[in-house]
């Protein structure tokens, strides 16, 4: 684990666009150091784009993303990668690669021409495997794993990078509900160990249960942000998703639990 | 450094050095390929119309032996063996670079027409400028680069990973091949005969000067390619993850393709556009060593083995000598096919 104080990550009036289409419009956001921030919002609201901007996969058209007082635009690639890790949706595992080999590629930003594989690299990989419960899988090819196992291996790869900030783009997609919960519990444990986590999630109730801060987006803007109890309200869910709903106390945690109402039938269903 | 680490329950775990498991197999394949290469080299030195017994070879290589023996073994046969090994290795590395950064096992420089483009550059230089090997190296480099740019522009809509680039490459390749034929028809008979010897890829009559020149010129490119390996490994994880771990995909890809063009151009000045080696060698290397990535060193070694073996077949195994390029298509192609069939059977 990094010994530095938690990193402070800020988005200052930043706009992000693909080609000529502006997706995120003059957005400002403070990621609290040590928080588990979950970004929610309807499809195409710009939440993944925001995450890509945070990770510098996309340069802002205007404004900036600031890490500990310094614009990330000016930070060398490897230096930034030692502080901030990202698990994108587009990660590709080379055919036949073993878990061990894949996880060790997270060490790339710590290595160089004159810095061969070191005991530090090795212990980082061992810790990452242990933290994600994938030690037993180390010699297996990634192709042969189940979806849940594979996702834990990808998290291990990002953990081996030993960054203070973890960015995760819809890490639970394609997982069944048991594996989704397993993965979120893993993230919660990593958060408790002191990492700042920013994740894009689809499931409102998972966001409400695991996040310390929820950021609700719509049309490239932040509609609400704050603790789950303040953000996940019936009015906000209705405003952000356009979904008729009621919010009740989660019987397990006491936090908010969103229950959609049934939409009135507008068309007749024919047999 | 190999250390063992204890996990929470106190069990001793095996060291996790990432390459430890696969490394042994890579080394074994490398050793086997080296033995084959030495055997082929020996064959290359003793086979031919002028018989030289095996036991005379060390003496002749050390500078002894009669004048004619020295001329045949060192000046002719050894030069040709070195040319085959060098060109094969350059093509193997170039193929591994291209196929890795495009994530496309078919996007090799020979399929994309870069060898033909480099050869066009050489022919134009020969016709318009000079026949010195320095000018030919420059001409082939310019031809290769222009071809690469043309393909990039024509295929840009889908990027390098799509199927489009292969189709564009095959088209460009065919156009350049016919342009090369036309160029040969335009020049004087003597120049045409000289140049057309290369047309299909040939090592007939290679001379020590140009071979040494091209290989020495390629050396820094080879070093550059090996320095690029860790970055290319990150690229295999997808562009987003490569960026997020601190490798810059666009820069790495551009540099890799540039180095690849340089290697192909150097190889083409020696032997003309030799087909299939750059395509097959990296895939054969990967399947033999069972690595997830295309191994650069093994690709070079297997490129050398494939080209040298092909050249021996081209010279000695057939009723009449053929250009080596004709044989690489058959030898490399057949071997790749058999490896793929074995792989399919293993999976079934």
Image (cartoon, rainbow, N blue to C red):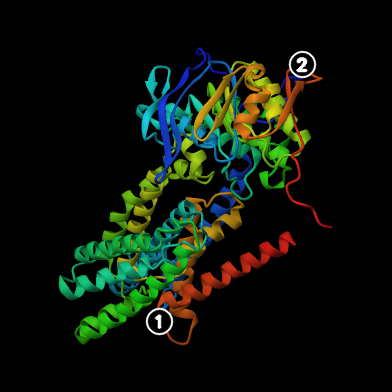
Q: Say yes or no: labels 1 and 2 on the same chain.
A: no
Q: Position of residue B64 (x, y in %)?
A: 32, 64
Vertically, is B243 above or below B166?
Answer: above
Label of residue B58 in the image: none
Q: Is residue B324 left or right of residue B192?
A: right
Q: Which mark is residue B49?
A: 1
Q: Secondary structure at mark 1?
A: loop
- Name the subunit of mark 2: A
Q: Is residue B202 left or right of residue B139?
A: right
How would you rate the neighbour count of disc 1 (Cα within 10 Å): few for under 14, some for 14-19, many for 20 or more?
few
Seen from this angle, which residue lies furthest right? Answer: A271
Quadrant into which the N terminus of chain B falls: top right
Where on the picture, by quarter, is residue B72? Answer: bottom left
Q: CA distance from mark 1 to mark 2?
A: 92 Å
**From what the image shows, is residue B346 above or below residue B293?**
below
Q: Nearer the viewer, residue B26 or B277?
A: B277
Q: Quadrant of the C terminus of chain B?
A: bottom right
Q: Residue at x 32, y 57 (%)?
A: B262
Please tell me which residue lies in front, A193 or B318.
A193
Residue B287, horizontal then vertical, whole percent: 60, 57
Where does the image place residue B195, in percent across and percent down from the top left?
27, 78
B316 versus B227 height, above or below? below
Is residue A71 rendered to the left or right of residue A137? Answer: left
Q: Which residue is mark 2?
A: A254
A81 and A137: which is toward the camera = A81
């Amino acid at each position: 684990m990094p010994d530095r104080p938690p990193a402070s990550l800020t988005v200052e009036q930043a706009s992000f666009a693909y080609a000529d289409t502006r997706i995120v419009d003059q957005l400002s956001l403070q990621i609290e150091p040590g928080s588990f921030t979950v970004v929610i919002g309807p499809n195409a609201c710009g939440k993944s784009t925001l995450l890509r901007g945070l990770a510098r996969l996309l340069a802002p058209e205007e404004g900036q993303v600031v890490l500990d007082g310094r614009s990330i635009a000016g930070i060398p690639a490897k230096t930034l990668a030692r502080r901030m890790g990202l698990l994108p949706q587009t990660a590709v595992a080379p055919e036949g690669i073993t878990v061990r080999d894949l996880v060790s590629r997270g060490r790339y930003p710590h290595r160089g021409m004159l810095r061969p594989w070191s005991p530090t690299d090795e212990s980082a990989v061992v810790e990452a495997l242990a933290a994600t419960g994938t030690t037993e899988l180390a010699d297996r090819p990634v192709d042969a794993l189940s979806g849940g196992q594979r996702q834990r291996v990808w998290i291990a790869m990002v953990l081996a990078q030993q960054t203070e900030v973890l960015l995760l783009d819809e890490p639970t997609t394609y997982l069944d509900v048991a594996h989704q919960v397993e993965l979120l519990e893993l993230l919660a444990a990593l958060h408790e160990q002191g990492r700042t986590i920013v994740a894009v999630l689809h499931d409102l109730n998972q966001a409400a249960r695991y996040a310390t801060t929820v950021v609700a987006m719509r049309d490239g803007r932040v509609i609400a942000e704050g603790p789950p109890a303040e953000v996940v309200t019936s009015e906000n869910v209705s405003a952000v998703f356009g979904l008729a709903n009621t919010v009740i106390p989660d019987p397990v945690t006491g936090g908010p639990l969103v229950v959609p109402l049934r939409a009135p039938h507008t068309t007749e269903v024919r047999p | 450094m190999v250390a063992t680490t204890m996990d929470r329950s106190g069990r001793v775990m095996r060291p996790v050095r990432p390459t430890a498991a696969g490394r042994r197999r890579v080394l074994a394949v490398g050793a086997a390929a080296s033995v084959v290469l030495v055997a082929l080299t020996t064959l290359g030195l003793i086979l031919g119309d002028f018989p030289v017994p095996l036991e005379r070879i060390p003496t002749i290589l050390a500078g002894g032996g009669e004048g004619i023996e020295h001329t045949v073994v060192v000046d002719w046969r050894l030069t040709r063996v070195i040319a085959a090994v060098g060109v094969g290795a350059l093509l193997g590395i170039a193929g591994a670079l291209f196929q890795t950064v495009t994530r496309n096992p078919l996007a090799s420089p020979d399929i994309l027409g870069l060898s033909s483009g480099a050869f066009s550059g050489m022919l134009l230089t020969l016709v318009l400028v000079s026949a010195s090997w320095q000018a030919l190296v420059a001409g082939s480099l310019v031809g290769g680069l222009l071809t690469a740019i043309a393909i990039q522009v024509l295929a840009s809509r889908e990027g390098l990973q799509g199927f489009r680039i292969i189709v564009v490459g095959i088209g460009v390749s065919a156009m350049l091949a016919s342009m090369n034929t036309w160029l040969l028809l335009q020049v004087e008979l003597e120049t045409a005969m000289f140049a057309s010897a290369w047309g299909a890829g040939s090592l007939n009559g290679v001379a020590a000067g140009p071979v040494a020149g091209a290989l020495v010129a390629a050396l820094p490119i080879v070093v550059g390619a090996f320095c690029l390996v860790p970055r290319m490994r990150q690229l295999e994880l997808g562009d987003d993850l490569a960026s997020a771990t601190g490798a810059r995909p666009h820069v790495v890809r551009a540099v890799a393709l540039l180095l690849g063009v340089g290697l192909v151009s150097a190889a083409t000045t020696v032997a003309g556009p030799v087909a299939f080696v750059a395509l097959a060698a990296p895939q054969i290397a990967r399947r033999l060593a069972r690595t997830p990535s295309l191994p650069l060193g093994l690709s070079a070694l297997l490129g050398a083995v494939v080209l040298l073996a092909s050249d021996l077949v081209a010279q000695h195994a057939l009723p009449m000598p053929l250009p080596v390029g004709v044989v690489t298509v058959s030898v490399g192609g057949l071997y790749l096919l058999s490896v793929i069939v074995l792989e399919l059977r293993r999976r079934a």
